[in-house]
Amino acid sequence: MKKSLLDTIIRYVGAGTVIEALRKACYFLSNIFEALFGVSDSLEPPRCMSVEGRRNYSKIGNEFLGYFVELGGLKKTDRILDVGSGIGRMSLPIARYLSKEGSYEGIDIINYGVRWCQKKITPRYPNVWFQRVDVYNKTYHRKGKQKASEYKFPYGDDSFDFVLLTSVFTHMLPVDLENYLSEISRVLKKDGKCLITYFLLNDESLDYIEKKQSRLAFNYWYEECRIEDKEVPEVAIAYEESRIRKLYEQNTLKIVDSIHYGAWCGREKFLSFQDIIVAQKL
Ligand SMILES: C[S@@+](CC[C@H](N)C(=O)[O-])C[C@H]1O[C@@H](n2cnc3c(N)ncnc32)[C@H](O)[C@@H]1O
């Protein structure tokens, strides 16, 4: 059978590398377009930045601002850390919400996502900053030099009132998640809050998975979590709820109210797509 050039390239370098190269090329071209025809006023990132949260950019950002405020008690004057800020899907609604006294720091491992936010968001909202961190993740940053399991956030103890991670622990392995959770606890002020999303395995979600009603099959066990893709575990990761609860306890994070379960597994009553845990630092 005759193979196309693209098939051959994918076979040699892998689909991930090809997608990454196409995305970089698209970003590069959009920069050239801007240089030639003037800077676009739009704060919506180009479509090629899809993996890091381009889908329903404003809709999901605004939906989550509601959760930060209503479930997490986010205040306009808070100092906020967004771990895995991506292409600013959460940053923008937060930037618009904050008062001059409030501030926001976003960290991420994807260079062009951070650069986009620095170029587009910070000039309009000077109390909103972004920083690239050089941490490895098989899906997002294969050349990352530091291990997520050992990485220390670049902030002092008790620095933030609010920490958020949306769709980030769903792409991180157990040792990495454990270190990040202890870092979240370290940088949170006493009584500060964190809002984090997950795919949580409990009797209900496992039942839906068994019955093949779940949007994500999580067919494989890997290092005590369940994954979608054997080759690249970080594509999507689900954790046992009991294990996450234990980790919160160990890190002096008290879960506020009950967990807000999501639609991902096919359940009929849900709040959002992923499961949401709000916790308070004791
Ligand atoms: C699905 S995207 C979500 C982005 C953003 N939180 C949102 O909801 O739009 C996952 C993000 O997590 C980031 N990420 C993955 N591993 C990370 C790590 N170890 N440290 C910081 N960010 C990480 C990725 O680069 C990517 O931007």
Image (cartoon, rainbow, N blue to C red):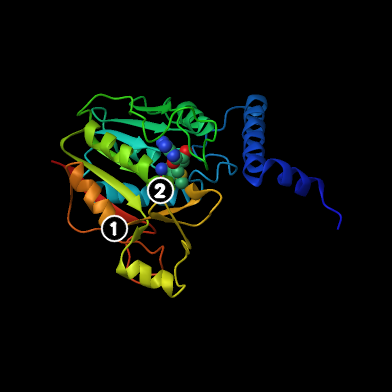
160 sits to left or right of 117: left
Q: Secondary structure at mark 2?
A: loop
Does residue 223 lie above or below 99 as drawn?
below
Q: Quadrant of the C terminus?
A: top left
| Amino acid type of the residue tagged 1 in the rendering | Glu
Q: Which residue is mark 1?
A: 241
- State the residue in front, 15 or 31: 15
Q: Quadrant of the N terminus?
A: bottom right
- State the residue in front, 243 or 282: 243
Q: Secondary structure at mark 1?
A: helix
115 sits to left or right of 106: right
Q: Which mark is residue 167?
A: 2
In the picture as drawn, the residue positioned furthest to the bottom comes out as 211
Q: Give the mark toward the camera: 2 or 1.
A: 1
Q: Earlier in the sequence, mark 2 or mark 1?
A: 2
Q: Residue at horizontal 33%, vertical 28%?
A: 152
**Image x and y of residue 272, in percent:** 36, 59
Location of residue 133 (image quadrant): top left
**Image x and y of residue 281, in percent:** 17, 40
**Image x and y of residue 74, in percent:** 23, 42
Classify 10 Å Cα crowding around label 2: few (below 14), some (14-19), many (20 and above). many
197 sits to left or right of 235: left
**Image x and y of residue 178, in percent:** 31, 42
| Amino acid type of the residue tagged 2 in the rendering | Ser
Dividing the image into four equal quarters, which quarter contains ligand 1? Answer: top left
Q: Residue at horizontal 18%, vertical 52%?
A: 256
Q: Which mark is residue 66?
A: none
Does residue 225 lie above or below 8 as drawn?
below
Does residue 270 lie above or below 92 as drawn?
below
Find out if the beta carbon at label 2 lies less than 8 Å from the nearest ligand 1 atom.
yes
- Mark yes or no: residue 126 visible: yes
Location of residue 275 (image quadrant): bottom left
